[in-house]
Amino acid sequence: MGNNQYIDIFIEESQEHIENLNSNLLLLENDPENRQVIDEIFRSAHTLKGMAATMGFENMNKLSHKMEDVLQEVKNGQLHISHAIMDILFKCVDTLSEMLDSISQTGEDNVPIDELIFLLSGVSSKPGNKENIVQKENNASGKDTLLNVYEEDIIREAAKDNYKAYKITVHIDKGCVMKSARAFIIFNSLDEIGDIINSSPSVEDIEDEKFEDSFTVHIITKEDKESIEKRLLSIAEVNNVEVELINIDLNKEEEKFVKEASSLQSQSFENIKKSQSNNKTSKSVRVDIDRLDNLMNLVSELIIIKTRLEGLEADNKNSETVSAIEYLERITTNLHDAVMKVRMVPVERVFNRFPRMVRDLSYELGKKIVLNMYGQDTEVDRTVIDEIGDPLVHLIRNSIDHGIEIPQERLQNGKPEQGTINLRAYHEGNNVIIEVSDDGRGIDIEKVKAKAVEKGIYTAEQVNDLSKDKILDLLFRPGFSTTDKVTDISGRGIGLDVVKNKIESLNGSIEILSEINKGTKFIIKLPLTLAIIQALLVKVGDEKFAIPLNSISEIVHKKEEEIHNVQGKEVVLFRGKVIPIIRLNEVLETKKISNNGNLMCVIIKKGENLACCTVDELIGQQEIVIKPLGKYLSNVKVIAGATILGDGQVALIVDANNLF
Amino acid sequence: MSLYVIAKIDEEEYAINIEKVLTIEKVMPITRVPQTESHVKGVINLRGEIIPVISLRAKLGLAEKEYDEDTRIVVLKAYDMLVGMIVDNANEVVDIAEEDIDNLVFNEASDEFGKFVSKVGKIKDKVFLILDLKKLLDIRV
């Protein structure tokens, strides 16, 4: 297929439109009369249709086309939003997203759509009218623009106030370079003298330059034919204008549509203008992540060179040079911040799938749940964002399934019938915090205790001495689930331990707060980025290594004689615990430096476990950029990557998780 | 006609298809990487990118030689990765005609060269051993 180079863009853009459809459908469900939302949905479906057709995805094209038909009826007020229609539309969106998955995997959109097409045709009320719309859509030259009933109503209503309706066909010079811009001027000019009712091709298409060299608009105005002609012909590159007075039977009036119609009329062009300013995509540029990485590399290089220059500056007495270098330093710091910011994406990207999920699951379980989201614009490095989706899905499912009670139970307990789940994201220092909380039944501490005893983790006496936090922590143990029944939604064996593992692998942490009958709150703490970390630089032998700060618990001095040999392994007593000694010079195969019996020990942690790493010298804490060692060395376990130090030297990053 | 970079180990001349060569660098500080095979010398910082470096001498089973003014790191770009290769010298590019390239049959078990060379090229009566990067970089397909 010749479209290969566009497929990535197609998939990405389609995904955005599908997400857009999903979130707007949810809005529509709660506010069925919201015209703007309907227009937004219609636009997304329309764009999807167009893109699918261009790329040759027949099924996708067909389905979105059919959706568009139904939406058109909704837009025109011929169809009222019902639960049934919403369900079908949601199913369509799901199917579209399935197709997209299939396209990204196999390059084909082979997903059955017959049933949905049938359902969509079922809800569609007036097949005849529908055909008209389709015909109008396809009619790119715009010669036979049809007015629909509502537009006729507008004209009728306007005629009462001495407005006249005209059909105007504008021919633009064939050599015109920016047709859409020219059209925009024409629209603006017409707007000054009256109101534009519709246009053919649609305003969207005209904006996208999807028209030959002429288009047709219907307009109501008090001006006469000649002055309109004169007005339009005065615009550059307008070749010819045909203005035609429209006579509509004034008696065929239906009062009930008028109100709606006149609002429609004022919206028609206003909306388009608004959508231009609302449209986020028009203000952003798509950039391949590789290019960003490349940019990041170059900036890192610049910082290194800058550090070298600073070193030279010390011997330099020339104040000109000194101030130039200081300026350079300021710029590079700003540049570094700016590049880091470019890599950041709002958590919205992950959050926006949750409203739909909560809706579906609460229907399924017969629960009433509202999801509130805060801080969607909190930004996180994209290395993190791709990873946090699954853990969050799991926690929200948990809340819906186990947390929130069924409505009767809630009423009995004196709570509002509708349960609430709050999803909150915010920055805290160099971390991002994401909280998932519900006002459900909370975690029954006694039940957890009983389970712990039953599983043989603790004895009955031990369990009573444990603090509440410790007991809640038990929930993160593998295979520890307090639910008696396994449901389809959660409790399928993948437990909180998986969530915890995932978050810890991202160098984050998670904790639970829970109060019985009041609710449960999960607090996830994640680093802003995985590409830049705080690390402790140490010397082992005469080589420099970096140890990530978040895996260091503390630094202590030990004496050689404090080391004991237990079953052939060296251990040391640390805060009443026996922990293994890891001699880094052996693991990292460096020179052995005599230490006179004094050991410098970095205590590293992996979850609950500690180990004592011996190093020869501490250099200090530093922010480092993690770079991979390269594919050729991908099997070196103890090294997590490398970083470039200020002097251009490479220091390896010790992977504390793989040391023991 | 294709161009080949000539890398020297002692007096032996090895040819590398120029399309697989990203750049040729003078020796720079190499950071040793633990728990690797002996032919892996470590990693270098090539303009902000971390690149593993191997020694062709070690790969061929020859004794290492002190790095000097002539020593070069030939950065290979093959099989989706970048690998630097240390050679005694690399300052020549030759043009070998397609018809002057012959397949070689080595006894892989006994001959060290046979492990990494599967073709030879000729220019007049000079013979170049063409390095087989797939074998050299241990690519298993």
Image: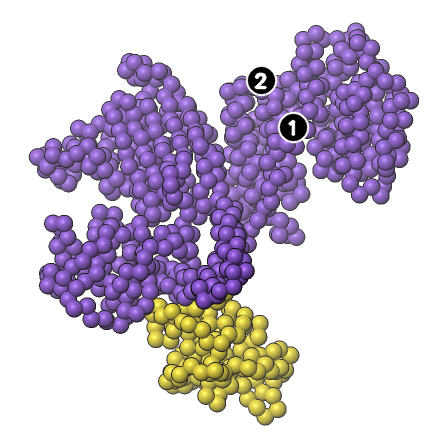
A82 versus A140 height, above or below: above
**Residue neighbourhood size for the residue with mark 1, other residues' Cα within 10 Å, grouped as few (<14), some (14–19), many (≥20):** few
Residue bearing the label numbered 1: A274
Residue bearing the label numbered 2: A33
A125 left or right of B85? right
Residue A96: which quarter of the image? top right
Query: Element type at marker 2?
Result: loop
- The image position of residue A65, as x and y in percent, is 64, 32
**Which chain gets the yellow colouring?**
B
Q: Residue at x 31, y 60 (%)?
A: A619
**Residue neighbourhood size for the residue with mark 2, other residues' Cα within 10 Å, grouped as few (<14), some (14–19), many (≥20):** some
| Mark linked to residue A461 | none
A444 left or right of B120? left
In the current view of this chain or complex, which residue is farthest to the bottom? B125
- The image position of residue A607, as x and y in percent, is 25, 48
Visible residue check, residue B135:
no
A302 versus A381 height, above or below: below
Sequence order check, earlier mark of 1 and 2? 2
Chain A colour in the picture: purple
